[in-house]
Amino acid sequence: METISVYATPSGNEKIWALLSHLSGLIGIPFLLPLVVYLSMRGDSRYVTDNAREALNFHLSVLLYGLCCLLLSLILIGLPLMILIGLAYLVLSIIAAVKASDGGCYRYPLTLRLVT
């Protein structure tokens, strides 16, 4: 697990947007919030942009993994994998939020980098 911390000290608002991007899946808006934050803050704050991009890539990757598990549930291995993905989703989102609150950017493991 790799942490990128090459940013100037982020302001309070920047930290809030970064935290919300990572925790958006837990509050029910996993794709929309990181996408809006990424597009709106792209020119203003590299810290917020990087955190929102990582969160968006993670949410999209989990969606793809969940769809694969849905297909695998036909051969009875999908349900245990889906439970494992759900637990990893919860734990990794919290870890990323903690790293973002410390002023860094957490790179999620096994995440497809779809948004660059």
Image (cartoon, rainbow, N blue to C red):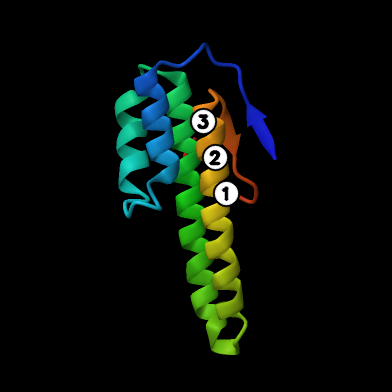
Identify whether 48 is placed above or below 76: above
Residue 88: image quadrant is bottom right
Q: Callout 3, which amino acid?
A: Ala
Name the residue that disc number 3 marks: 100
Q: What is the number of callouts on the image?
A: 3
Name the residue that disc number 2 marks: 96
Name the residue that disc number 1 marks: 92
Tell which residue pokes out farthest to the bottom in this image. 75
Across and down, in percent, residue 63 comes to 46, 60
| Spatial separation of the CA atoms under disc 2 and disc 1 | 6 Å
Q: Please say if the residues under marks 3 and 1 sit with CB atoms less than 8 Å apart.
A: no
Describe residue 11's horizontal placement relative to residue 7 as left or right.
left
| Spatial separation of the CA atoms under disc 3 and disc 2 | 6 Å
| Spatial separation of the CA atoms under disc 3 and disc 1 | 12 Å
Across and down, in percent, residue 15 comes to 42, 25
Badge 2: how crowded within 10 Å, few (<14), some, or many (20+)? many
Q: Please say if the residues under marks 2 and 1 sit with CB atoms less than 8 Å apart.
A: yes
Local SS, label 3: helix
Identify whether 84 is placed above or below 9: below
Residue 56 or residue 9, whichever sits in front:
9
Q: Callout 1, which amino acid?
A: Leu
Describe residue 81's horizontal placement relative to residue 52 as left or right.
right
Q: Please say if the residues under marks 3 and 2 sit with CB atoms less than 8 Å apart.
A: yes
Badge 3: how crowded within 10 Å, few (<14), some, or many (20+)? many
State the quadrant of the N terminus: top right
Describe residue 27's horizontal placement relative to residue 80 as left or right.
left
